[in-house]
Amino acid sequence: MGEAAKDQTEEVIQAWYLDNKEEDQKLPHHKDPKEFVSLDKLAELGVLCWRLDADNYETDEELKRIRESRGYSYMDLCEVCPEKLPNYEEKVKMFFEEHLHIDEEIRYCLAGSGYFDVRDLNDIWIRVWVKKGGLIVFPAGIYHRFTVDSDNYMKAMRLFVGGPVWTAYNRPHDHLPARKAYMKKFLKVIGDRNIDASA
């Protein structure tokens, strides 16, 4: 990703280390002082980010190119807000349980905003704030969670390879092949020991 594209993407996707306070999950939870995380660091964890034209998603050639190159054949739209999502508070709590999927999780924010939290190489939480125009891809096997922010609204496009798969595996599920593959590729872990990434 070129510097100009990265700068534009950082306008709609920002990341920082969490303060780990237990108060309202919908707050930013910055550390003091704030400790931001670059898109390059997210990429090292397998998290991919783009900025796209959310106002014209139906005709956006860049979105079409990404979908074709990555095989995202299925798409639907979901609005996470009290008015549109049945059992809203219950669902938001469920989304915030730390979990993984055996396939990629792809979310494109068409309106509103929300937080996706992921773990770094040392198992420390990073909060990723995705706003309108941000497309984010989480690799299969990464532990993560989601919450809306204090605006309580996010309209997202959900993309899948083939049909939709909704199964979430709450932590711990380190025995799953998707988790083992993620650990080997991104965390450089085999069994219970770290391996030299340069080896």
Image: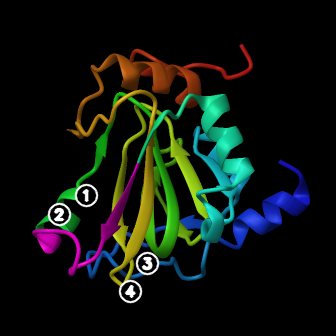
Rounded to the nearest angstrom, the CA distance separating label 2 from label 1 is: 6 Å
Which comes sooner in the sequence, label 1 or label 4?
1
Q: Are marks 3 and 4 in contact (CB under 8 Å)?
A: no
Looking at the picture, which amino acid does disc 1 mark?
A: Phe
Badge 3 local density, few (<14 within 10 Å), some, or many (20+)? some
Rounded to the nearest angstrom, the CA distance separating label 3 from label 2 is: 21 Å
Q: Which residue carries the number 3 mark?
A: 29
Which comes sooner in the sequence, label 3 or label 4?
3
Rounded to the nearest angstrom, the CA distance separating label 1 from label 3 is: 18 Å
Q: Residue furthest bottom?
A: 151
Q: Which residue carries the number 1 mark?
A: 95
- The part of the image, by quadrant, that contains residue 54 is bottom right
Residue 60 included in the magenta stretch of the image:
no
Q: Which residue carries the number 2 mark?
A: 91
Which comes sooner in the sequence, label 1 or label 3?
3
Q: Measuring from the top left, give residue 106's x and y in whole percent.
A: 48, 46
Rounded to the nearest angstrom, the CA distance separating label 2 from label 4 is: 16 Å
Q: Measuring from the top left, give residue 189's x and y in whole percent.
A: 50, 22
Looking at the picture, which amino acid does disc 3 mark?
A: His
Secondary structure category for the residue under label 2: helix
Q: Which residue carries the number 4 mark?
A: 151
Q: Tell me the magenta residue range.
A: 76-89
Looking at the picture, which amino acid does disc 4 mark?
A: Asp
Q: Measuring from the top left, give residue 141's x and y in whole percent.
A: 40, 31
Rounded to the nearest angstrom, the CA distance separating label 3 from label 4 is: 15 Å
Above/below status of 60 relative to 15 = above
